[in-house]
Amino acid sequence: MHSNLNLTHRGSLVAVKHVLETYTSSSFFTRQREMPGHKNGAFLGVPQQLLPIIPTSLIPISMPRKSALDRIRKQGDTVLKANELRPDDIVIPIMGQTGAGKSTVSNLCWTRDEAGAKTAEKLAHYIMPIPTHWATRYHIGAHCRVVLLDTPGFDDTQLSDSEILRRIAVWLVASYGLNAKVAGIVYVHPIYPGRMTHNDCSNVKVFQRICGDAGLSKVILATTRWNLCPAGTGEKREEELVKTFWTNLLQNPQSADGKAKMMRLQNTTNSAREIVKAILEKMAQSKINGVILSLQEQLVIRNKRFQQTEAAKELRSKLEELLNETGSSSSEDRRGRLRSIAQQIGELKIPLGMRIKMILGLD
């Protein structure tokens, strides 16, 4: 009997029955009244308390399993396609808050004609050729290209945080399936006008969970808006980031491969290219072609559901804290905000039906 399946009322049992009936109605499921060698109706690990209400003919012996991508992908999602990729291509995701200047890297590194932009709402990737002298210097293939993934930032006005994380997960899982190598990650943060907020810190924690310890050693922390920052202010903010907010990222004692690197991203082509070159330098020094991000590893290798990943859990914690801080209000805007947060929290929890399918091996 599965102790982690807490079925305390008839409604839960009916839900289980509905799940089994739905998922065993297709002809490709093999049905058998009783599995050989099992006594007392112990079918495929089905808890004893379910047997009185579930026809044993409905209990499947074997089920086709969905891929990690199939579980989280929706129609219209942007992914890297096999015909776009070459064996030596490397991937550099660009992340950070909305309006931080993430697109600066892809906009300035190469022209759009060179990049071959793949436009999509709120998420896009750009495939860019690497100059020959870069390939020689960093010991990469002569025909290697960089795939820059421009991701939407959390706290976007049009997309929820849970949807943003899901879209990022879809792209990363799809690229993993094509053996695309993540060379490094750029995290963009504006040095001006505002200071680091509590919400910014929460977003950095989600970013850490996406990368994992191994991924953090490949991170470039790029600060932007230096051209708008008054003299002296930027240096103080930079010191604050180093000593207070980004200490774990910049020291990262858990990784034997090193730590994140902090750089200034000026509004120039040369500065943007220096960011990419810094990642190629890290890759050359480690003598490893790429890194598997923690989010990829959990979804694909460890076969976790999206809601079970550390990134999703961290985001849910952020939203739950935000929900508690927001509190109740008579304002319609505030009530709408509360409903949105509550909906996202729900999306980051595993529904009862899915938990049942997981226990019974139906998904």
Image: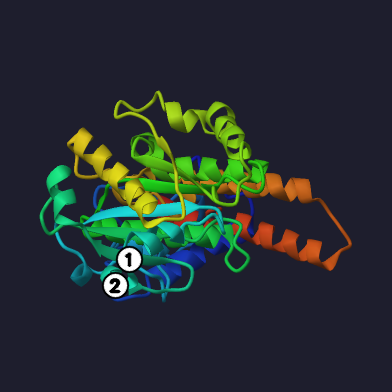
Taking depth in this image into account, of 105 and 308 the one nearest to the observer is 105
Check the image and name the residue furthest to the top: 253
Q: Secondary structure at mark 1?
A: strand
Q: Which of the 4 quarters of the picture holds residue 73?
A: bottom left
Q: Quadrant of the N terminus?
A: top left
Taking depth in this image into account, of 110 and 20 the one nearest to the observer is 110
Residue 299: percent from left, percent from top: 36, 51
CA neighbours of label 1 inside 10 A, class few (<14), some (14 to 19), many (20+): many
Residue 279: percent from left, percent from top: 30, 44
- The residue at the point 26 percent across, 63 percent down is 128
Q: Which mark is residue 126?
A: 1
Relative to residue 80, is residue 38 depicted above or below?
above
- The residue at the point 12 percent across, 59 percent down is 143
Q: How many marks?
A: 2
- The reply to whether residue 62 is in sight is no
Taking depth in this image into account, of 91 and 177 the one nearest to the observer is 91
Check the image and name the residue furthest to the front: 231
CA neighbours of label 2 inside 10 A, class few (<14), some (14 to 19), many (20+): some
Residue 146: percent from left, percent from top: 25, 57
Q: Which mark is residue 116?
A: 2
Amino acid type shown at disc 2: Gly
Residues at marks 2 and 1 touching, judged by CB atoms closer than 8 Å: yes
- Mark 2 or mark 1: name the one nearer the start of the chain: 2
Amino acid type shown at disc 1: Tyr
- The reply to whether residue 236 is in sight is yes
- The residue at the point 29 percent across, 76 percent down is 27
In-image side of 122 versus 217 (left or right): right
Residue 69: percent from left, percent from top: 34, 62
Between the residue at mark 2 and the residue at mark 1, the CA separation in whole angstroms equals 6 Å
Q: Quadrant of the C terminus?
A: bottom left
